[in-house]
Image (spheres, grey):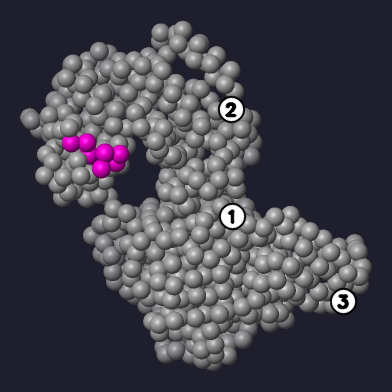
Amino acid sequence: MRGVFIFLVVCLSASASVVDDVALRILSKQSVASSKAMATLTSNGSFSNVDYTSGCQASRAIWDAVNHWTFTSAGAMRWYQTNDTAILAAVKRAMDYWFAHDFPEGQKCLPNNGYDNCPCNTPGLWNPNWWYQVIKTPKTAGLSCVALAVRNQLSAQQKEGCVRLLNRGGLYVKKYTGANLSDTALVAVYLSIVTRDESLLLSAMDQVNRACDLVSYQDGINSDGSFIQHGGLPYFAGYGQIFAADIFDLWDTVGLNPNAAQKSAVSLFIRSSVWSIYHANGVANWDFHQMGRGVTYGPNSARYSGAWKLIQSTAQQWNDTALATAMARLQVNSSLQGVNPFKLNGVKVFYKTDYVSYRSDNFVVGLKMLSPRTYTSECYNGQGIQSQHYSDGVVYNYVNGMDYVPSQVFWGYTPPGTYVLYAPEFRLWQGLKKFVGSVSNGRTALSAMDFLSPINSQLSYKKSWHFFGGLYVVVATDIVQSKGLPVITTLDHRISRGDFSTDTGVFSVPSKTFRWLHQDLVGYYFPSPSGLTLNVSNGNVSGNWQTIAPQNVPVTAKIFKPILTTDTGSFVYVTVPGLNQKNFSSLLPTLRSSIRVIRANGDLHAVQHLTNRTLTAAFFSPGNVSFNTGKENVTIGIDAPCIITVSYGYSDNATVIHAADPTQTLTGVNVFVQCKMCVSPGDSKFNIA
C-alpha cells in the first residue's frame, strides 16, 4: 500500500491543477443558492437575525453566532453562481465583520491549549465549547473562503482571516478520531484550496482513509460493525452518520479512494447500522441506543438524514451489492408500511458496544447493557440530562414507529425496561462487572448482565434477556439495594395509544393478582407473579424539553408506564411485541405451555422454549443444566462462566450449541453433554474457543 500511495503523490504533485479541480468539484456540487441569502445583512457586516452572544454567556449546545457563516457561505455561492457584484460586496462585508470581531489569536480558545488561556473576559466571537472553534465555524466558513479564493477575490486581510479560521481545524486532523477527524479533514481540504497546498490535501485524505481501518474498542469502525465515539459509546446516528456522509463526500470530491480493506470496513459499518433502523410512516429512524445524548435533541432528532443517495451510488461503483441494498432501505418512501418494511429479521449482536438488535416482521427491539468496556450515556453541553441509566439494560420496543418521541421528556431516571436507583447523579460511568454480553445463532439469542451500580455500588442484580421467535423472556435475580433507596422496575415508558388491559381488568391501584398486561401492540405475560406488584399509569403528562436539553419547548403527551416491584429480589416476565390484544390473548395458552423457566438464581438463568426446541442459559458460575427434549433428558455442563444457546430436535438428532464469553477474557470453555440420542451418544466433552 505504501508504494501505491507514493505513486499517487508523484502523480498529483505533477499536476498543477489538482487543488483547482477539487475546488471546482466542491463548488459545482452546491445547490442553487437563494437570492435572499444576504437579505438580513446590516451596514456593519452583521446579520440582524443572528444572535452574536459569545464567550461564557453563549450556549455550548446551540451557538447562533455561527449562522453568520451559514448566511455568508450561501451568499458566496449565490455570487459564484451569478457573478452579482453587489452580492460579492455584501459577502466581503460579512467576512470582514467576523474577522474584525474574531477572538485574539493570542487567546487560544482551543481544546489543546486549555481554557485557562481563554478566560470569560476574552473579547471576540468564541464559544466555551471547543467544537465551535475547531469544527463548526471553520467548516461553515470554508465554503465562503473557497468560493472567493478560486476567483482571486480575497483581499490579503480576508485571506489571512480565512487561513486563521481554517487552521483551527485543518491542522488538527491527526489529533482527532471518528466523526471529528472526518470533519477536520474537510476543513483541511478547504484550507489546502485557500493556500494551494497539495501536500496538505494529500495528508488530509490519507488520514480519512486511515480512519476507515478497523479498530478495537476505539473511536471509529469496530470489527463487529459498531461505530464508536467518545471511547465507548455506540453512535451509528449522530457521529456515525456524519462520519459516513463526510468520507463519501470527500471521496467523491477529492478522490484518493480507500483500499480494499478500508472499503470492506466501511461497508460493514453501514450495513450493520441498518440493523438499528426502524421506520415511521415510511421514514427511517434511528434506535435511541445509537444516538447518545442526541436522544434529548428534539422530536425529530431520530430521523435518518444521511447521504444515502451518494453512498448508494458509490456502492454501485464498488460493485458492493449488499451495501447498495442496505442504502435503499434508508430512502423516504411513504408507501412503506410498518416499523420493519424490508423484513430485515433476526438477531444481531454488537459485542463491542454491549448492544443487541432483535427484529421481526412487526417489531424492532433494541437492548443496551453496561460493562467495563462501555459507558453510560453522556451529558455534555446541557444535552443528555437525566440519561445516566440509558445503558442499564434499557429495552426499546418499536412497534408502530411513534413509540417513544417525546416520551423521553418524561422518563426522568426511569427509562424503558430498567431496574434502577432513583438517584439523580451524573457523570460518564463505565460498568463495574465484566460478565456482560450476548450470544446468538441468528434467530435465537441470549444477553446477560451482572450489574453493580457504578454510581454508588448500592444496587446490584443479575439479569438476562432470552430472545426467541416473536418474544423475549426477562429474568432478574439477586436484586439487592443496600441503602433502602427507592428502586423502580419500569417495564416500558412509552407514548400511549389507547387503554391497557389485564386479566383482572383495568385498575387504578397497584395489583398483586395479575398474569398478563397488554397495551397498544405490546403484551406482557408473568409466568410466576407471586411476590410481584404491578402499578400502571396511563394518562396525559405535561413537561418541557429543557428538563433534558437546552431548549424551552413545552410538551404534553399520553404516557404508558407500567412499574413492577418485587418482594423476593427476583422476577420473570415475557414480552411479546407487535401483537394486538386479540392475537396476544390467543397466544397466551401457547406461552403458558411453551415457556419453561428451568432455573433462575444467582448461578444460572436458563429458559427453554418447548415449541421452538431451544434452550438459552446464562451461567454466571460454572455448572450444569438439565432439560427434556421431548425424547430424552439432556444435561449440559460448563466449566467456566459463559452464555449458551442450544437448538435440538433436528432430523439427524443433532444438538447445536453456540457459546460466548461475556467477560471477553477466556480462550475457550469446556462443554460436557450427557444424552442418549445425540449424534455422539453418552457423555461428550468438547472445547469451544
Left or right, 216 with respect to 93, comes to right
Residue 323 location in percent, x, y? 60, 39
Tag 3 secondary structure: loop
As drawn, the label of residue 259 is 2
Residue located 25% across and 49% down the image: 60
- Which image quarter is the C terminus in? bottom right
Specify the amino acid type for callout 1.
Answer: Tyr
**Taken as a whole, is the magenta stretch helix, strand or loop?**
loop
Label 1, on which residue? 351
Q: CA distance from mark 1 to mark 2?
A: 26 Å
Q: Is residue 113 magenta?
A: yes
Quadrant for residue 199, please give it: top left
**In front of the other: 159 or 150:** 159
Out of 277 and 1, give the one closest to the viewer: 1
Counting residues from the start of the chain, the first of labels 3 and 1 encountered is 1
Which range is magenta?
A: 107-114
Residue 26 seen in this snapshot: yes
Image-based side of 455 in relation to 618, left or right: left
> Between residues 6 and 548, which one lies in front from this camera angle?
6
Q: Which residue is mark 3?
A: 632
Secondary element type, mark 2: loop
